[in-house]
Image (cartoon, grey):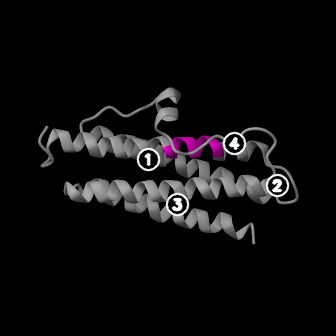
Amino acid sequence: MNIGINQDDTKKIANGVSSVLADTYTLYLKTQNFHWNVTGPRFHQLHEMFEEHYHELAGAVDEIAERIRALGHKSPGTFKEFLELTSISESTGNINADDMLTALIDGHEAISRKSREVIQMADEYNDEATIDLLAGRIKTHEKTAWMLRSFLQ
């Protein structure tokens, strides 16, 4: 494979993107869990919004994994691999709607921060495709976090 980035550098980028993938998948599962289990006076509104968000995240998971493959490396795809790579913690127990919102905001912001780190590395190796992918993801995560924060004010 010769895409203009040497194999060692594509591996570094792929490892960074793999962390973003693990965070995205973990946030996807958390969002779907909250969709199923949200209760309270805002149930319908949050239930519908969480569903929209986990559908969007499902598409992102595929796109991110395919970028790792395009870099010539294997994408992580097991719960064990994701658990080792993610920076997003699970939410267990009976969680109220505000705590769900806070946990999701934290997750979206964590992915934005991690994506910025990987963009810096990708820029160092002139990997415009990864930069483009992650810049788009940052835009989505920041907008989603803003929308979720609006429920807490």
> What secondary structure is the stretch in magenta mostly built from?
helix
| Label 2 sits on residue | 43
Q: In the rendered structure, which disc, 2 or 3, sits on the residue that comes first in sequence?
A: 2
- Crowd around label 4: few <14 · some 14–19 · many ≥20 (10 Å): some
Label number found at residue 112: none
The amino acid type, in three-letter code, at marker 1 is Val
- Real-space Cα distance between discs 2 and 4? 18 Å
Q: In the rendered structure, which disc, 2 or 1, sits on the residue that comes first in sequence?
A: 1
The amino acid type, in three-letter code, at marker 2 is Phe
| Label 4 sits on residue | 91
Q: In the rendered structure, which disc, 1 or 4, sits on the residue that comes first in sequence?
A: 1
Above or below, 125 against 142 in this view is above
* Nearest to the observer: residue 122 or residue 70: 122
Q: In the rendered structure, does residue 24 fall within the stretch colored magenta?
A: yes
Q: Which residues are magenta?
A: 23-30
The amino acid type, in three-letter code, at marker 4 is Ser
- Crowd around label 1: few <14 · some 14–19 · many ≥20 (10 Å): many
Q: Quadrant of the N terminus?
A: top left
The amino acid type, in three-letter code, at marker 3 is His
